Image: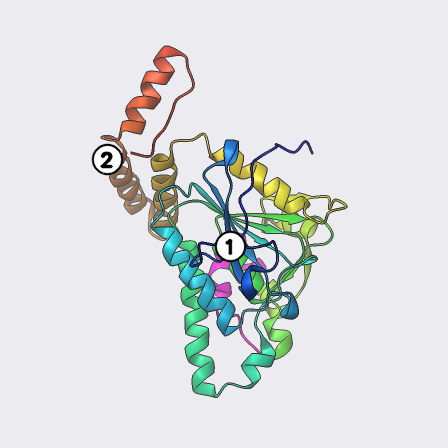
Amino acid sequence: MLRVLCLLRPWRPLRARGCASDGAAGGSEIQVRALAGPDQGITEILMNRPSARNALGNVFVSELLETLAQLREDRQVRVLLFRSGVKGVFCAGADLKEREQMSEAEVGVFVQRLRGLMNDIAAFPAPTIAAMDGFALGGGLELALACDLRVAAASSAVMGLIETTRGLLPGAGGTQRLPRCLGVALAKELIFTGRRLSGTEAHVLGLVNHAVAQNEEGDAAYQRARALAQEILPQAPIAVRLGKVAIDRGTEVDIASGMAIEGMCYAQNIPTRDRLEGMAAFREKRTPKFVGK
């Protein structure tokens, strides 16, 4: 695949304004980078907990919740891309070693926080993309399911809701998002069996949008996800955000109610400068310059 050259800014923990080296950032498990140049508008979240294969521990979840809360208010974020800084792994799911040290009450509270995290990802106003270049198991797949779009390496990405093999139940949205993605019967089969799927198998089932052959660098899914984000960038940002709202809310209700939701979203788009700019650009046969207003 031909790679588009873009300017890169250093990875950093969101709350710290100083630059950080890739994979370090003072030990932060969640790091953020906003791309520049032709890719301005794409923001990447790097999950970087190599000692536990990006397992969903307390610090990891807290940092990701804080990051999402801050990025949600940033209108410069046009596409949010989740990727891993740990080669061969997207997210290994629950941190079972940490979980063993919790009381039953603490487990319940933590899983509730985890479910809230996935809901925050799903409700993020801009499009979200998961780039899975490695294992996405249990909660790792639930994190990817919370994203709008998913890209996987064909062979090296292995995914599955494997909680039942560990005496657990998917508790971060998997029992709800998987059937909405694949249908009830297939979701039940995958959850009941704890089956693991390759990226290719996941693509055939419709679990991921794209499956790509892995490259020597081990980041083929990320490269394809970034190319997908580049396709979104030229589109009117308000229309894209409202389209996400209309789809997400509309699929939860009957079609008549869904049409009403679409109508409300369309009405919000009518007075925007972007809509007028799009019409003018079409009339004048030029590329529109959207400003997100």
Q: Which residues are magenta?
A: 168-187
- The correct choice, above or below, for 46 with respect to 116 in the image is above
Q: Quick check: 236 above or below 260?
A: above
Name the N-terminal-most of marks 1 and 2. 1
Query: Residue 184 magenta-drawn?
Result: yes
Name the residue tied to disc 1. 12
Q: Which mark is residue 63?
A: none
User: Callout 2: helix, strand or loop?
Assistant: helix
Q: CA distance from mark 1 to mark 2?
A: 38 Å
Observer-nearest residue: 5 or 186?
5
Check the image and name the residue furthest to the front.
Answer: 18
* Residue 182 lies in the magenta stretch: yes
Q: Which residue ends up furthest to the bottom in the rendered image?
A: 103
Residue at the spot 32% in from the left edge and 19% down from the top edge: 279
Q: Position of residue 89 (x, y in %)?
A: 66, 60
What amino acid type should be assigned to the residue bearing mark 2?
A: Ala
Which one is in front, 113 or 189? 113
Of residue 10 and residue 57, the one placed in the foreground of this image is 10
Q: Quadrant of residue 239?
A: top left
Measured from the top left, where is residue 95 in percent x and y? 58, 74
Residue 217 versus residue 98 in the image, above or below? above
Indicate which label's residue lies in the foreground, 1 or 2: 1
Q: Which residue is mark 2?
A: 267
Q: Position of residue 31 (x, y in %)?
A: 52, 56
Task: Please identify the residue farthest to the top as the structure is shown.
Answer: 284
Q: Position of residue 42 (x, y in %)?
A: 48, 41
The residue at the point 62 percent across, 66 percent down is 92
Residue 68, compared with residue 292, is above or below; it is below
Residue type highlighted by circle 1:
Arg
